[in-house]
Image (spheres, rainbow, N blue to C red):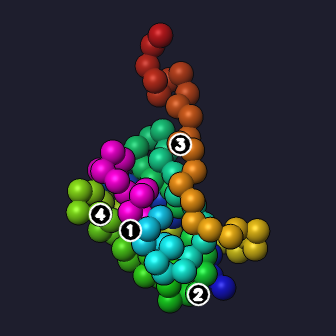
């Protein structure tokens, strides 16, 4: 079992990245989650067979055809045995500073 936590930077929000990531992860037999971050990145956690995890991280470098990925930063993390599916998590809440005045 291998688990990886990653951040994807570029034009990765509003382009179907999370949905495509979930579909790809499920096809690879992985569990975990993906979500949008307030700073414009996408965050994901995936775990499963090492080769399949590596394939999802490789996929994240291109994402769906509508995405323009600039970088993927990933680190190995301890596995979470409670995960049973690959889900889209709620977006990270924006702070007042990130939303602007008002």
Q: Earlier in the sequence, mark 3 or mark 4?
A: 4
User: Considering only vertical position in the picture, is 6 above or below 26?
Assistant: above
Q: CA distance from mark 2 to mark 3?
A: 27 Å
User: Considering only vertical position in the picture, is 97 above or below 77?
Assistant: above
The span picked out in magenta is 11-21
Instruction: Return the residue at label 1.
Output: 60
- The label shown at residue 49 is 2
Percent position (x, y) of residue 25? 48, 72
- The label shown at residue 91 is 3
Dot 4 falls on a residue whose secondary structure is loop
Dot 1 falls on a residue whose secondary structure is helix
Q: Is residue 100 visible?
A: yes
Residue name at image x 70 percent, y 68 percent: 83
Check the picture and name the quadrant holding the N terminus.
bottom right
Do the numbered discs 1 and 3 sit on residues whose CB atoms are within 8 Å?
no
Q: Earlier in the sequence, mark 1 or mark 3?
A: 1
Q: CA distance from mark 3 to mark 4?
A: 19 Å
Label 4: how many Cα within 10 Å (few below 14, some 14–19, many 20+): some
Give the mark toward the camera: 1 or 4. 4
Q: Is residue 4 visible?
A: no
Q: CA distance from mark 4 to mark 2?
A: 23 Å
Residue name at image x 68 percent, y 70 percent: 84
Q: Nearer the viewer, residue 21 or 23?
A: 23
Q: CA distance from mark 1 to mark 3?
A: 18 Å
Does 31 sit left or right of 14 as displayed?
right
Residue name at image x 42 percent, y 49 percent: 41
Residue name at image x 53 percent, y 21 percent: 96
Instruction: Return the residue at label 4.
Output: 64
Q: Earlier in the sequence, mark 4 or mark 2?
A: 2
Q: Nearer the viewer, residue 60 or 9?
A: 60
Does 1 sit left or right of 74 as displayed?
right
């Amino acid at each position: 079992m291998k688990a990886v936590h990653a951040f994807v930077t570029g034009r990765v929000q509003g382009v179907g990245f999370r949905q495509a990531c979930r579909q790809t992860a499920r096809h690879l037999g992985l569990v975990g989650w993906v979500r949008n971050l307030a700073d414009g990145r996408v965050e994901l956690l995936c775990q499963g067979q090492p080769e399949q995890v590596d394939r999802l991280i490789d996929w994240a470098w291109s994402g769906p055809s509508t995405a323009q990925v600039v970088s993927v930063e990933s680190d190995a993390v301890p596995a979470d045995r409670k995960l049973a599916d690959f889900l889209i998590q709620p977006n990270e809440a924006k702070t007042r500073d990130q939303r602007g005045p008002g």
